[in-house]
Every structure is written in structure tokens, then in C-alpha cells.
Image (cartoon, rainbow, N blue to C red):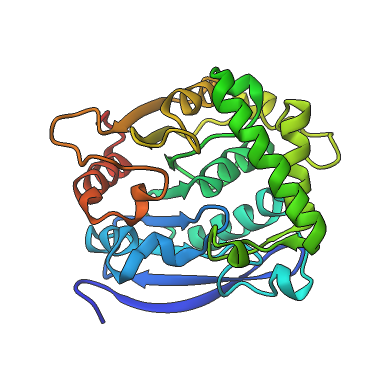
Amino acid sequence: MSEGYTRDTCSVETEDHWQLCVERYRVDAPKGIIVLAHAMFCNARTMDYRGNGLASACANHGFEVWNVDFRGHGSSGPHAAAGATWTYDDIVQFDVPAVAAAARKAVPNGPLIWIGHSLGAHAVIASLSVTPELPIDRIVSLAGGVWISQLEPSFKRWLQKVAIFESWLMVTALAGYCPTKRVGFGSEDEAEPYVRQLVLNGRRNAWLSVDGKIDYLHQMGRVRAPVLSIVGEADRLMCHPVAAREWLLHLRNAQVYHRVVGSRASDPRGIDHMGLVTRSEMSAVWSELLDWSLTGRKI
């Protein structure tokens, strides 16, 4: 038991029969439900860092919270090192819809807010571009963006991203999966088909499904849910504020609000890609995004 909420876990089965683990924060008479979705190379623990992070803040604001581990991450095994495989499309077309539907069923009243960090942000946009009727009322994109050259106006930054992509693929090809934990880049390994899909998209300058039949970027016009984009001023490469804006310009039929942490005198300084969800100094910004989640008013 923690102040204002209790915690337990539940499992959500996807259409392709993967069991996703969800840490559930329950409150009495919830204002709505928030789904938290983590970044690549990470798991759900980053969304409640040291047990006193964003998930706890959401629950203390009166929301039920579902903090999900995507397939192959955290408690949603099996993992890549054990031979499990998945693609980016699997997260987009199976994990996101299953969690959204189960969360809506569990808490039928109040808004359903999806707060995604990096992967958790662009995956939900991709999912809504395929299935716009998903029961998601608002989206908070924390450092959400896609690595393709048409969305990166800086040639220098794009060269850095290409170098990362190609190194990532080389290491993955040698190991048979991306050994993130071994190289010290994160807590979660990634599957080879997932890595290959993202690198191939970078090479062909397109945000596509693995079979090339779905152009997620082109279909962003189908997304109707309002989006609040929050990026850190100190995120100089992973999700530069300019690159995030370039990506979200493709949401032609959704309201989009932008917030750069570090642009206001009262903001914490030095907030980078991971700092948006791991730095305790973000608590005031978290309160802002939770107010927006209820009201939709510009922050």
C-alpha cells in the first residue's frame, strides 16, 4: 500500500497469444485510466523510477495506472537472449491494441490516456494510424520521434544516427539479437527482426511495416486523438525538439501541443531523453501533463 493507491499485477493476452505483464496501480473512484509505455532498451520500471516516479505521480493524481512491459521486456518474457523474436509491427499491431482494449474494459469511465516514452510514444501513433478506433482519448508523447532522414533536418545529427543504426545492426548480427545489457546501453535486449526493421526503415527513409505494405508516416493523418509532445531541451540526439516537431507535423487531423522542458525559467535544467521519466525534478511537469490529460487545455 502506498499513499492513495494499491499495487498489483495483471496479464494481458495479445491476439498472437503473447502474455504482457502490467503493473496496476488502483485508486478509489478513478478519474480515468493512464497507460504508461516504456522506451526501447528499457522496461516498465523506468516509468516509476525507484518506486517514486511518473506512475506513482499519476496514481496520486487520482488515475488508475497500467504500467506495461512490452513483449520481450521486463516481466513480459520470453526474452531475446532466450531466443524470442518479435518485430516493431508486433508491438504496434498486437501489444498496443490489446493493452488499450483491456484497460478500457477495466476502467470504462473517464478518459483513457496513453503516456508513451520514446518507443511507447511512436508505437501508439503507429497503432492508431492502422486502427484509429482504438479507445484512446489523449496521448502524451515523451521524447517521441522516428529516425528517418526526412524527419531529421540536421545533416550532422542524421550522420550520427546512421552510425548508431549500422553499429547496432552489426552487433545484433554477430550475437543473433541486440545484447543491450552486455554492452551497457540499457536493461533490455532487443530481438534481431525488431532491430533489422528499424535499421531498414532508416536506410530507405520511410516508416514502414516490415512487409512494406503499411506506411505509418503517411497514415498519421488517420489519428484523431489530441497529442501533447514533451521533449527535453538537453535531448540533443535521441529526440531533438526540432525532430519531434517534424514528425508530429504529419498529424494533420489531430490537435498537437508542444512543451520543451528547459524553455521556461521555472523548468529543471539538463533534462535529456531518459531524464523526462527518471528525474525527480520533473514532478511539476508531470503535474502539468496530468492536468492536460483531464482538461485538454494548452499547458
Picture quadrant where residue 138 is located: top left
Q: Nearer the viewer, residue 84 or 189?
A: 189
Q: In which quarter of the image is the N terminus?
A: bottom left
Q: Position of residue 175 (x, y in %)?
A: 78, 63
The structure residue drawn at horizontal position 44% and vertical position 56%, both measured from the top left corner, is: 36
Please state the total of marks drawn on the protein image.
Answer: 0
Q: Is residue 295 visible?
A: yes
Q: Nearer the viewer, residue 150 or 35?
A: 150
The structure residue drawn at horizontal position 25% and vertical position 49%, both measured from the top left corner, is: 282
Q: Position of residue 21 (x, y in %)?
A: 56, 72
Q: Quadrant of the C terminus?
A: top left
Q: In this view, does 124 lie to the left or right of 33?
A: right
Q: Is residue 117 above or below residue 161?
A: below
Q: In this view, does 18 lie above or below 164?
A: below
The structure residue drawn at horizontal position 59% and vertical position 19%, both measured from the top left corner, is: 155
Q: Is residue 167 left or right of residue 212?
A: left
Q: Where is residue 288 in the image (x, y as percent from the top left)?
A: 23, 42
Q: In this view, does 287 lie above or below 174?
A: above
The structure residue drawn at horizontal position 29% and vertical position 42%, both measured from the top left corner, is: 289
